[in-house]
Amino acid sequence: MLQVCLNGPRGSADGARVPLTPRAMAESAARAVAAGATDLHVHPKSPCGHDSLSPRVLAPTLEAIRARVPVPVGVTTGAWAEPDAAARLERVRSWAGLPELPDHASVNWHEQGAEEIAATLIGLGVGVEAGIWSGTDGAARFAVSPLGPRVLRVLAEVTDTSADTAEDTARTLLSGLGSAHGRPVLLHGEDGGAWPVLRLAGRLGLATRIGLEDTLLLPDGQQARSNAQLVTEALARYRPRS
């Protein structure tokens, strides 16, 4: 599986290529899927361009993207979108009133309230991507979580941005995850570590992701023009298993 991460917490300062509106996200998603992406991860944005968990922001984003692509669509529940854990949980609970829900949502296991948010998502019928970041206690928390066997997949997220060390950090993270409760693992890096970790995922036969959330650069260091271009470059270096 090759997931495309359309925008992440990036904003207008990162350039017009980063999609921030539902229409722009849908267009970028359509082109990325046409290039070969098989799954989507997106950060819905408020009108001022900030990540939002509000159902009033989530609903039009999902509607616009699903009108253009047939692949699963996932969203974030990151603490930066709503720093207060109780308020973040209430935001996610409020998704129950939406006409349609995301196929999956990422939950960062090192963040306060992760277990409650994951349980709420599972109760809503939304798949959980358990985000396990390097350099955190996420792997240790996940190892003893009763929800571990029930998540959709594990996101092994390498936060080491050095091209020289990210692969070693990735291997350490995977070792710490152990069996990951038997769940599929998606391995990815960010910024300088994005391409080395993607190539490692290919060698290990793991799912991976690429997109403007993870990197603004092509493997040769040039600026990427779009998510579709990043997907094309990724597929030239890694063929995801079906």
Image (tube, rainbow, N blue to C red):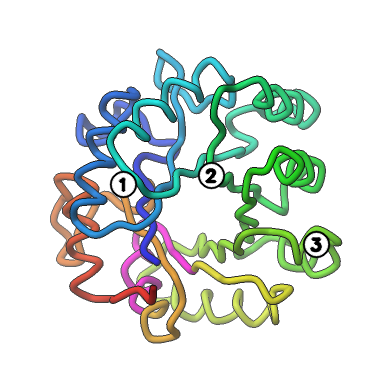
With 42 as the anchor, is 36 left or right in this view? left
Was residue 121 drawn as part of the magenta stretch in this picture? no
Determine the residue located farthest toward the bottom in the rendered image: 203
Which residue is disc 1 drawn over? 212
Using the image, determine if residue 174 lies above or below residue 53: below
Q: Position of residue 61 (x, y in %)?
A: 41, 26
- At label 3, the amino acid type is Arg
| Chain-order first, disc 2 or disc 3 | 2
Residue drawn at x 83%, y 62% is 145
Circle 3 residue? 141
- Find the magenta span and give its range: 187-199
Residue in view at x 65 percent, y 57 percent: 130
Residue 179, image x, y percentages: 70, 80
Point out the image quarter for the N terminus. Answer: bottom left
Picture quadrant where residue 14 is located: top left
| Pointers 2 and 1 in contact (C-beta within 8 Å) | no
Q: Nearer the viewer, residue 17 or 126?
A: 126
Occupied quadrant, residue 226: top left
Q: Is residue 236 above or below residue 70?
A: below
In the image, which disc is placed on residue 103? Answer: 2
Count of marks placed on residues: 3
